[in-house]
Image (spheres, rainbow, N blue to C red):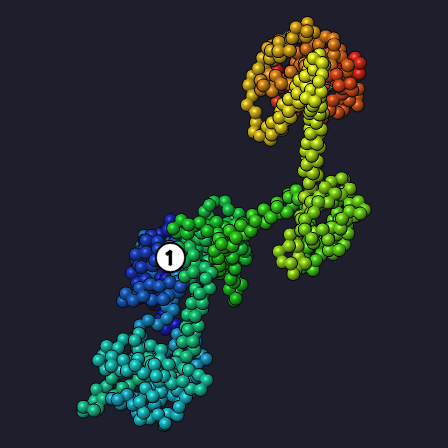
């Protein structure tokens, strides 16, 4: 890059306490001209017009013994903004006593650990062009080398701006022979859109109001095949003549096509950078604090901060909150080491909204010396994709749960009819791994689990969409198979396998229960009907009549007992599926005594004996249910024995339980009888001498379990039985 104005070079001596002495100043008086000969450097630079951020940075660099350069904008002596390159040389210790410069402060300390450094302010572009025609030889700021001819073209024009005289590389620049243009307006050589600008220039030059910046407006020439060239006037003067039609112009222009193109390209590059949507900041890697020195619009838009709030800060400003983020540490380290890196951090926009920021760092090295000069950080707002990923992983976890933790087996068939997926339950239910098998092989493998002669699976599914299928392997089960198919034209489908063994067993039991209940009722009903019919049709003697009515009464009692027990069974089973029972603390001994009192008919009273507990026992229980259990156990003991019945209360401190043992010396039970004792309708009464329904013990055991207890039996045929009810004690036993 070539420049027009001489740079300002300041040779400074900097003391450790921040004071400086201006040892020498070369040229560039218009830049930082107000800098005094000594003082505090930071204050002096700020007062001389250097922006605070630049001062901080300059001092940082000097303290760090580093050198760097960066572009700044500064008002010059006339107050006009000038683009400058501010640079500092690496500070060095002075070799010996410094030469006393003419304007040096007499009291400056020469040898106190001070360092010396050069600070240079180099103008980047011409702002004020004071020269007349002689100045037009000055080179254009940038990129003139590739243009047709860098020499200026000098012109004389008449009052109507027609060409009178042409000197210089006109043909090379304009593409027309000079002779062909003489006498024609210069405007003819310009592109149509530049004609207005040209006329404006002429008008202002004639009025004497044309300033240098106006004059330097790039103007496109009339396009030649394959090229569009640009020129810039470095001089345009009006000479008034003697007569009214006299007068004319002197002008000088140069070609600036390459320069314009570069500026256009630069502009497009900057626009393109803004259009990307990604935030871009350039970080000064040579400055110890790594300040951001360049920022694009997208970065400002994404973060909500404007350029002035970003420049000079470190990237930590955007990655440091909340503290201790792993991603922020990664970026910090990469910056320190000058490495490429990327990380996602939680950040906040200026208005406080949180977002996920993905930063990608790319180091830039000086192509000449390989030194790391800058790092480009690209920022992308990845909030949406982070949230999407989070949602997706949540969904996939749910799907995984649905798929894998589902107790039902799922077998998925793809478009080609092959098994593409099975969940864990399939293996549990069938013991098979079917993935990869064709549809036919899969059904063969499933069919092999059932007995020979089982209905054909595929046909059954085809016809009804589901079927129940008893298998023997890996153990006996009833599996319900259901086919789910979205599109009947596609082979893709889902097969759902459900273990319905318990359900089918329950249905079976209910059927059996109904059949048995009906059977049990039929016997007394038949007797009642038979005896009643006899009484109606036959003339029977009064004593026989009485006998028959007695039997009818007996059977109706049996029937009503059966109905009561059946109602109890259905109530108890329904309650088992209901909510928790409301329990209360009950003094066990008094509950047992109540039951014994109920059963102590005159004939039975002396057969009952209660052996009380060594200490009072309180159970957490339900009075009505406890009474029903005790009534059943004690009445059974009386029913199935003629001898003494002993009721003993004990407790087991280890398990916190109370035990109520009902012991009789009665008919007793064999092992085979005991194994079926608690099932519905089971009775041992070969001669039908004892009344009963065979539901009492089933009800008692179900109630005991509902109260958190159990009933155990110990018996010997012909010797007697002991039924023990165990219940949890209230509080610590
Ligand atoms: P039920 O007494 O109405 O027949 P249970 O369910 O109470 O019905 O008893 C079922 C069967 O268990 C009785 O029929 C009887 O054969 C046998 N059983 C119950 N308690 C005793 C006992 N203390 N001694 C001997 N057998 C008993």
Give the left or right position of residue 236, taking residue 668 as reference.
left
Query: Where in the figure is residue 147, as x and y percent of width and height?
Result: 43, 81
Left-right relation of 338 to 260 = right
Determine which quarter of the picture holds residue 240: bottom left
Residue drawn at (37%, 68%), measured in percent from left and top?
Answer: 123
Q: Which image quadrant is residue 557 in?
A: top right
Q: Nearer the viewer, residue 22 or 687?
A: 687
Q: From the image, tell me which residue sits under label 1.
A: 306
Secondary structure under tag 1 reads loop
What x and y, as percent, mark residue 555?
Answer: 68, 20
Quadrant location of the N terminus in the rendered image = bottom left
In front of the other: 522 or 569 = 522
Find ligand 1 in the image and state its quadrant: top right
What is the number of callouts on the image? Answer: 1
Circle 1 packing at 10 Å, graded few (<14), some (14-19), many (20+), is: some
Outermost residue toward the right in this view: 452
> Does residue 695 appear anywhere in the picture?
no
Q: Nearer the viewer, residue 136 or 620?
A: 620
In this view, the residue farthest toward the front is 539
The image position of residue 90, as x and y in percent, is: 45, 59
Q: Residue at x 39, y 92 (%)?
A: 177
Regarding residue 641, the answer to whether it shows in the image is yes
Residue 530 versus residue 595 in the image, above or below: below
């Amino acid at each position: 890059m070539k420049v027009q104005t001489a740079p300002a070079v300041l040779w400074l001596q900097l003391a450790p306490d921040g004071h400086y002495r201006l040892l020498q100043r070369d040229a560039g008086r218009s830049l930082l001209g107000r800098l005094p000969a000594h003082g505090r450097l930071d204050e002096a630079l700020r007062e001389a017009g250097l922006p605070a951020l630049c001062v901080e940075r300059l001092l940082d660099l000097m303290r760090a013994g580093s050198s760097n350069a960066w572009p700044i904008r500064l008002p010059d002596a006339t107050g006009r903004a000038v683009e400058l390159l501010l640079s500092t040389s690496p500070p060095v210790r002075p070799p010996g006593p410094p030469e006393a410069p003419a304007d040096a402060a007499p009291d400056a300390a020469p040898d106190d650990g001070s360092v010396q450094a050069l600070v240079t302010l180099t103008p980047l572009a011409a702002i004020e062009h004071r020269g007349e025609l002689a100045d037009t030889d000055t080179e254009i700021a940038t990129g003139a080398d590739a243009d047709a001819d860098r020499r200026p073209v000098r012109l004389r024009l008449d009052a109507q701006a027609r060409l009178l005289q042409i000197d210089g590389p006109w043909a090379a620049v304009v593409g027309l022979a000079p002779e062909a243009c003489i006498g024609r307006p210069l405007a003819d050589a310009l592109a149509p859109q530049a004609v207005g600008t040209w006329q404006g220039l002429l008008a202002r030059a004639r009025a004497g109001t044309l300033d240098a910046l106006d004059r330097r407006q790039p103007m496109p020439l009339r396009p030649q095949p394959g090229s569009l060239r640009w020129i810039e006037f470095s001089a345009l003067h009006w000479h008034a003549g003697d007569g009214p039609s006299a007068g004319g112009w002197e002008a000088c222009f140069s070609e600036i096509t390459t320069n314009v193109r570069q500026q256009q390209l630069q502009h497009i590059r900057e626009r393109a950078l803004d259009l990307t949507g990604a935030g871009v900041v350039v970080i000064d890697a040579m400055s110890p604090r790594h300040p951001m020195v360049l920022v694009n619009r997208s970065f400002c838009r994404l973060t909500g901060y404007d350029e002035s709030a970003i420049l000079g800060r470190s990237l930590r400003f955007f990655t440091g909150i909340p503290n201790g983020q792993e991603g922020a540490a990664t970026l910090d380290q990469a910056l320190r080491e000058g490495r490429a890196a990327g990380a996602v951090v939680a950040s906040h926009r200026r208005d406080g909204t949180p977002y996920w920021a993905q930063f990608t760092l790319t180091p830039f090295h000086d192509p000449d010396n390989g030194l790391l000069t800058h790092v480009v950080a690209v920022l992308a707002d990845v909030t949406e994709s982070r949230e999407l990923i989070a949602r997706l992983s949540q969904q996939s976890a749910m799907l995984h749960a649905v798929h894998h933790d589902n107790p039902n087996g799922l077998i998925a068939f793809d478009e080609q009819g092959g098994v593409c997926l099975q969940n864990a339950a399939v293996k549990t239910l069938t013991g098979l791994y079917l993935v990869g098998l064709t549809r036919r092989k899969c059904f063969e493998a499933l069919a092999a689990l059932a007995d020979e002669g089982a209905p054909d699976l595929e046909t059954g599914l085809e016809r009804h969409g589901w079927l129940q299928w008893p298998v023997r392997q890996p153990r006996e089960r009833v599996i319900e198979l259901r086919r789910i198919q979205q599109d009947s034209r596609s082979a893709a489908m889902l097969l759902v396998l459900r273990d319905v063994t318990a359900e089918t067993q329950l249905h079976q039991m209910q059927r059996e229960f109904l059949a048995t209940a009906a059977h049990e009722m039929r016997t007394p009903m038949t007797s009642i009907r038979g005896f009643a019919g006899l009484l109606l049709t036959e003339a029977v003697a009064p004593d026989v009549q009485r006998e028959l009515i007695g039997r009818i009464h007996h059977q109706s009692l049996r029937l009503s007992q059966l109905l009561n027990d059946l109602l109890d069974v259905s109530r108890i089973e329904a309650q088992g599926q209901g909510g928790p029972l409301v329990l209360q603390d009950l003094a066990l001994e008094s509950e047992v005594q109540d039951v014994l009192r109920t059963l102590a008919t005159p004939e039975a009273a002396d057969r009952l004996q209660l052996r009380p507990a060594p200490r009072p026992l309180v159970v957490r229980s339900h009075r009505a249910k406890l009474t029903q259990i005790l009534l059943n156990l004690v009445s059974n003991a009386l029913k199935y024995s003629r001898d003494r019945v002993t009721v003993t209360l004990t407790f087991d401190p280890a398990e916190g339980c109370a035990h109520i043992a009902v012991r009789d010396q009665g008919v007793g039970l064999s092992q085979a009888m005991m194994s079926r004792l608690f099932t519905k309708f089971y009775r041992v009464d070969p001669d039908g001498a004892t009344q009963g329904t065979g539901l009492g013990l089933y009800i008692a055991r179900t109630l005991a379990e509902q109260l958190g207890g159990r009933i155990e039996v110990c018996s010997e045929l012909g010797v007697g039985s002991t039924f023990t009810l165990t219940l949890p004690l209230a509080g610590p036993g």
